[in-house]
Image (cartoon, rainbow, N blue to C red):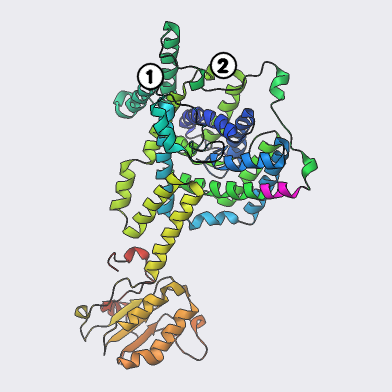
Amino acid sequence: MKKLNKKYLKGDLQAGLVVFLVALPLCLGIALASGAPLFSGIISGVIGGIIIGFFSDSELSVSGPAAGLTAIILAAIASLGSFETFLLAGVLAGIMQIILGYIKAGVVSNYLPSNVIEGMLAAIGIIIILTQLPHAIGYDVVNEGDYFHINKEGNYDMFPTIIKAINFMHPGAVIIVIASLVVLIAFEKIPFLINLKAIPSALVAVLTGVIINETFRFTGSTFLVGPDHLVSLPIPDSMSAFLSQFSLPDFNQITNKEVWIVAMTIAAVASIETLLSIEASDKLDPLKRYTNTNKELKAQGIGNIISCMIGGIPLTSVIVRSSANVNSGGRTKIAAISHGIFLMLAVLLIPMLLNRIPLASLAAVLIVIGYKLASPKVFMHMWKNSKKFQFIPFVVTVVAVVFSDILIGVGIGLTVSIYFILRGNLKLAYFFKQEDYSADKTIHMELAQEVSFLNKAAIKQTFAHLPENSKLVLDASHSIYIDHDVLILIKEFVELGCKEKNIEVKLMGFRKEYKIENTDVHVTNVLSDNDKPVSRKEIHSGVKVPSNALKLEDLSDDT
């Protein structure tokens, strides 16, 4: 557990308050969509904030119940027969996550391309905006969640819901969302309010919505937003009723193989979603810190064990809350922990007051957060500052996530990204041009730090396009690893291939461990005609022909 950093305490507490406002309806809505008791979502949110906040290695990630698990939880509760049996599966899933952390499964996140992560974040922003539009105009029949368009059956009905919402527009909700958006934009544009850092803009926007609706109530206006369009916290009428909302796992089902299957499913999906969220959170971090993902898996496991032991549903690191945290000024884990504390105190002390908050005000807060994630500037930045093999996977990921879900969408984006990587590695950086070469120049071909079998085709094509009667220096002095197949290719070219075109080949930097059977390809120095070492300056004065073992950024878009 990291020591709490109090340097950003004020900003973290403000961010924690904003995340609390965002998380409150999410906890309730995801529990409802999962077919679990409403209070189980609150338990999960509190544990995700306080417990995982303490144990997490991430400074910005916020954990809680995630909509990506709703369909799994809904089906699991039905198949296992009781909520208590499902809780046992959640406990076992947490234990599995701890094991995954110890076997260092978290390193998987290091292999996710940045353009795919950027695409996932932009897609999340678009989804937030689209799915909050019905809430913004008073159509609140769809359950809340990171992907609010998931219904109880786990089906996607986002676009039909938006169309249907137009026919059920509530004028009071429209007035509230416009007023809340004006407040949020004012805090972004007006210098006086920008400098007023002591008050979170989201809190002012929510209070504005409450005041407007209470005014409607006091004046008897037909614009009054009713209970169906407000936050709805369960309010127990006694301590025994409050305690009855907690549940314990049914350990008698420990030998039920269905429980173990559900546990493995939850552990796998929750871990993948967590790793994606952590990678995205690190991407958003203005201080550019990196999270130990193996420690994060352990923290998530501890959180899931505790949550399910007392009646909460499984949780993950959640992108919506994490991005809300960053955009609200959160800089350390104090923000995540404080959001959990606020959530716990609010449920215990002021549930009736919270039930006065219009969902339209919360929709305004989330729409602004979504816009920041999917701003046109993000797309322009990716277009201007990346080549097509980076921009295309970015766009594909955006579209795939919006029209499917996070796991399928990222999988499609990753597949496209891998295709471009393979395509690039199988091609030349650029072909050797005859006009760039003259008889008195030496062609210098420098291999990269790591040369894999994917570079074999590119190097082979480079050899094929070398001009006759030329001189080639093949430099491996910077190479840490060269694939065996590539070494065989070089051996064959040195022994036979170069003789067909009368090409003089000199090798440089091939270490002894690169030796292949009976070949002496492991030359450590380049010698000139008079047997004196050729200087690095002399080598680089020649014509340089890079193989595609060089950096992928050097690829030409025309190849």
Please tell me which residue lies in front, 466 or 66.
Answer: 66
Image quadrant containing the N terminus: top right
Q: Report whether 87 appears left or right of 184.
A: right
Callout 2 amino acid: Met
Q: Where's residue 336, x and y in %?
A: 54, 35
Q: Residues within 10 Å of mark 1 (few under 14, many from 20)?
A: some
Tag 1 residue: 171
Callout 1 amino acid: Pro
Above or below for 350 versus 83? above
Residue drawn 48% across the image and 26% down it: 140
* Secondary element type, mark 2: helix
Above or below for 266 versus 5? below
Magenta extent: 256-263
Tell me which corner region of the image, top left, top right, bottom left or bottom right, holds residue 173: top left
Q: CA distance from mark 2 to mark 1?
A: 24 Å
Q: Where's residue 187, x and y in %?
A: 35, 26
Residue drawn 37% across the image and 65% down it: 552
